[in-house]
Image (cartoon, helix red, strand yellow):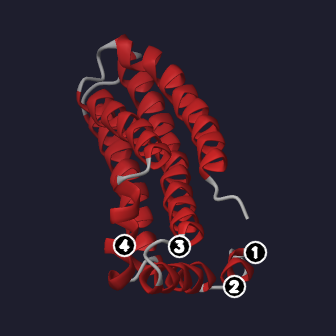
Amino acid sequence: MNKANLRRHWLRPGSWTRAAEGFVQSAALDLNDRQARYNLETMAWGTAMGSRWVALVGIVAVSFGSAHLRAGAAGTDALVTYLVCAAVLVGSWGGWLLWQARRVPPHLRRPLLLVSRGCRPVLGMAFAVALLIVHSGLALVLWRSAVFGALAIPLFFFAIVTSVAGRTALQQRAPKP
């Protein structure tokens, strides 16, 4: 039933939450249930992986804004560009966090965080996304430096490589039936 909730979960509101609740209940009933733990790890990794697209929106917005500012924007035009970039960063991450807060009820957050803490693929994906977040924030503040523009593409490809490597590592961790 739990995996059935995950199929086409975009079409059915609450299906991700129902599946996570089932996996948490299964893991709570049997502490040695490797399948439930693996399913929770996969869900946590998928959540971290999905956030890379929000980070990409931030990188693109800041890159375009920085290019506009370096091209000679001054005065009100520069301030508007800076504020728009900041609004895109805050709005995209704020929207994502609100969506996640709605998607993951408070009683499921702790089990997902505990499982995530011990899973290297999840930590690797979270690290790659954190690098993208730091890059966007620093590029917004230090927009005059061309180094940040040059780092955007390699950092995003690092996140993609990390997601592929993480998926492979998770598949290797899958319990054998």
Q: Distance between the Cα atoms at labels 4 and 2?
A: 23 Å
Near mark 1 (Cα within 10 A), the count class, few <14, some 14-19 or many ≥20, is: few
Upstream in sequence: badge 1 or badge 2: 1
Q: Which image quadrant is residue 127 in?
A: top left
What residue is shown with label 4?
A: 111
Amino acid type at circle 3 is Asp
Sequence-wise first label, 3 or 4:
3
User: Dot 3: within a 10 Å radius of its alpha carbon, few (fewer than 14), some, or many (20 or more) residues?
Assistant: some
Label 2, label 3: how far apart the Cα atoms are: 27 Å
| Camera-nearest label, 4 or 2 | 4
Q: Residue at x 57, y 86 (%)?
A: 18
Badge 2 is on which residue? 12
For marks 2 and 3 on the same chain, the one whose residue lies earlier in the sequence: 2
User: Is residue 31 depicted above or below 22 in this figure?
Assistant: above
Q: Which residue is mark 1?
A: 7
Q: Earlier in the sequence, mark 4 or mark 2?
A: 2
